[in-house]
Amino acid sequence: MYGTISVGLGGLPNGRGRDISRWCMHRWCKGTSEALGVSRSVIGADILANAGQCVVVANHVSTADIIILGSVLTMDYRWLAKAPLFNVPFTGWHLRFAGHVPVYRGEQRHKNSALAKRIHQAVEEGASMMFFPEGTRSETGHLTEFRIGAFMAAIHEGLPILPVVLRGTAKLMKKNAPHTDPDAEKHCSVAILPEIFADPAIAGESDKQRAER
């Protein structure tokens, strides 16, 4: 139902379509969480309520991360999602209408040359950006090495980093599992940590060096 609304009205002009698609995403994630009987607790809700435009970074351990995050975040934010998802009927159409940003891999990696431009356009439209800086789901539940894209975006757009810690989603739905585990504990938490602002640039320092720092 929400997919039909998003696809049917997502093309409305002047940002109205994106607002509808974003509302559909939140309602779908919230409804799905409740239908699965998953309780969610938000730690640092006051930080989230007071956050302005930012670059949200979260750990990534499960497909369920998207559902849980989507049920909590109500701000205008744009995912960076694998490009093939944009070709999936309904899901891909929704992603396009909502203004999310495709990331290419393999032989199409060269198309990422326009990534900074797409991110800047989303920020110009008033959106925050949402990254899983590990780039893929962790096999162990522990953090893996971060890629630099989220931090380059924060530097280029002059936005703070808003760290988010997800717990419980790995047990709820293991990596590559076709569905949630019916025997798993159905409670997840979303911890919102204080914003991190980039330190001032050092003379002679490149944006990449500043982002790494």
Image (cartoon, helix red, strand yellow):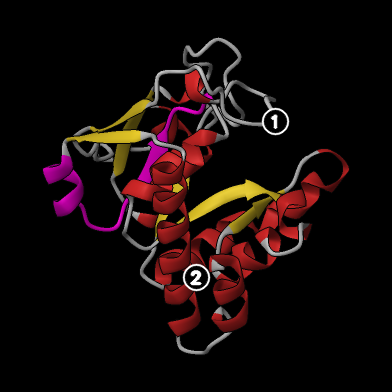
Q: Position of residue 89 (x, y in %)?
A: 76, 62
Image position of 145 (left or right of 125): right
Q: Residue furthest right?
A: 107
Is residue 206 visible from the viewing direction of this image? no
Q: Which residues are magenta?
A: 45-61
Is residue 118 visible from the viewing direction of this image? yes
Q: Quadrant of residue 95?
A: bottom right
Point out the image quarter for the C terminus. Answer: top left
Which numbered disc, 1 or 2, marks the residue closer to the eye?
A: 1
Indicate which disc, 1 or 2, sits on the residue closer to the N terminus. 2
Identify the residue under disc 2.
Answer: 21
What's the residue type where badge 1 is placed?
Pro
Image position of 181 (left or right of 165): right
Of residues 70 and 164, the one nearer the viewer is 70
What's the residue type where badge 2 is placed?
Ser
Identify the residue under disc 1.
Answer: 178
Mark 1, secondary structure of its residue: loop
Mark 2, secondary structure of its residue: helix
Point out the image quarter for the N terminus. Answer: bottom right
The number of numbered discs placed on residues in the rendered structure image is 2
